[in-house]
Image (tube, helix red, strand yellow):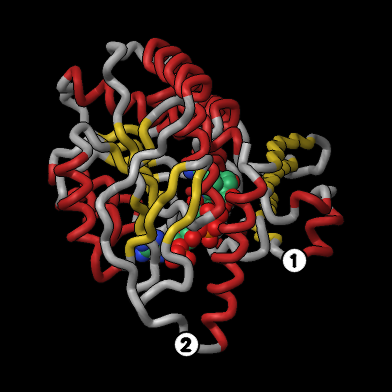
Amino acid sequence: MRTAACRGQQQQLWASRGAAAAGPRRAAAPPLRPPRRARPGPPAALAVDAAAAAAAAAAGLAPGLRPPVMINSCTGRMGHAAAEAMVRAGLQLVPFTLTGYSAGVAVSNIGVSGVPVELVGKERRQEAMDRVKERYPGLIVVDYTLPNCVNDNAEFYARNGVPFVMGTTGGDREKVVDAAQAAGVYAVVAPQMGKQVVAFQAMMDMMADSFPGVFSGYKLRAVESHRRGKPDVSGTAKAVVGSLKRMGVAEFKDSDIVKVRDREGQLRMAVPEEHLDGHAFHTYTLTSPDGSVEFVFKHNVVERTIYAEGTVDAVLFLAKKRTEGAKQRVYSMVDVLLEGSLR
Ligand SMILES: NC(=O)C1=CN([C@@H]2O[C@H](COP(=O)(O)OP(=O)(O)OC[C@H]3O[C@@H](n4cnc5c(N)ncnc54)[C@H](OP(=O)(O)O)[C@@H]3O)[C@@H](O)[C@H]2O)C=CC1
Ligand SMILES: O=C(O)C1=N[C@H](C(=O)O)C[C@H](O)C1
């Protein structure tokens, strides 16, 4: 659960970013301080230990195998939610996070569930990564940033030899996979981390394998709604549409997916007003050529807990693969699900 204090800090950060568009930001870059560890009191520590042991056991990990996790970026909505989930699960949150800003930042440190996390601007990311790798052996990185830096970030992690979970959508997906493969780093690359949605995605894929062309000639209408600022078309919708195309739907391009980002449109789709800033509604409607048959598949999610919890599973899965020295390096969330690694 995000505390009021954390929310306040993050809102202050977002507000300062908004202000930055209109004027210069504070110039002084914060020093790259040595990591500070959160010191929970005894009852919290016990609770965290129990959660960590349970999470590690669920992932089939030895009790000591709880990887430290660096999340980029804890300044974002999804990164922050994932970071909170890591802390809830008792994993060690690395107290540094990358940000897209290269100059000094108005807010240099944000809190995630009581862990102070220092913001690292782009120009110091290698310096920070060197320090983080040295101080946090067994590091795993999680990326929830933006489509325009997906490839640069994946190459950065690959170059540094750190396993990563790429939850960010967009960019050139093949290049993300290639970067990890070429460097031999373990990675989970998936536009969707929510267990039940991943199962739906897998089911559609299996249906396409078993019944290719079953919807031949059917017309598809795909509509997705996300928070106003999401720049790209839903990565999940693209994956599901890919399966539907294999089932034979009439000519359909990713650009035909209807992207709803306006408040009125979202309210018309029954997105609860309090979740306009955190929802993912998807509807796929298939209509037979003569209009006599209709199929509607729908998955509607509010908030981000479902993805945050799935991200913990992906991290534990990667830690396990690395320990086993698995030959396969790059995985999807469907692989994680098929292996029974989603708690
Ligand atoms: N796989 C899944 O299940 C899910 C995936 N997502 C995806 O996660 C991504 C993030 O979504 P959301 O959190 O809502 O977006 P936000 O805009 O809230 O967060 C994105 C963050 O990325 C940071 N950022 C931008 N550029 C860089 C960079 N070069 N290096 C490091 N950090 C950077 C920004 O930080 P700053 O302002 O400090 O630069 C910003 O805070 C999207 O692609 C979304 O679709 C979302 C939910 C679930
Ligand atoms: O940005 C989001 O919020 C989400 N993004 C992912 C996507 O694009 O598929 C997953 C989910 O829809 C939430």
Outermost residue, bottom side: 23
Can residue 235 be seen here? The reply is no
What SS does tag 2 mark? loop
| Residue 110 rendering spot, x and y as whole percentages | 48, 55
User: 312 or 86, which lies in front?
Assistant: 86
Q: Is residue 56 above or below residue 212?
A: above
Q: Which of the marked residues, 2 or 1, is nearer the chain's N terminus?
A: 2
Judge the density around disc 2: few (<14), some (14-19), many (≥20) Cα neighbours within 10 Å.
few
User: 164 or 125, which lies in front?
Assistant: 125
Q: Which residue position is annotated with label 1? A: 262
Identity of the amino acid at label 1? Asp
Q: Is residue 141 above or below residue 75?
A: above
Q: Residue at x 27, y 20 (%)?
A: 65
Which labelled disc corresponds to residue 24?
Answer: 2
In the image, is 44 to the left or to the right of 301? left
In the image, is 298 to the left or to the right of 67? right
In the image, is 322 to the left or to the right of 215? left
What SS does tag 1 mark? loop
Identity of the amino acid at label 2? Pro
Real-space Cα separation, disc 2 to disc 1, in angstroms: 29 Å
Quadrant of the rendering where the N terminus is positioned: top right
Q: Is residue 229 above or below residue 289?
A: below
Q: Indicate which label's residue lies in the foreground, 2 or 1.
A: 2
Q: Is residue 269 above or below residue 28?
A: above
Q: Residue at x 42, y 18 (%)?
A: 49
| Residue 26 rendering spot, x and y as whole percentages | 44, 81
Q: Quadrant of residue 18?
A: bottom right
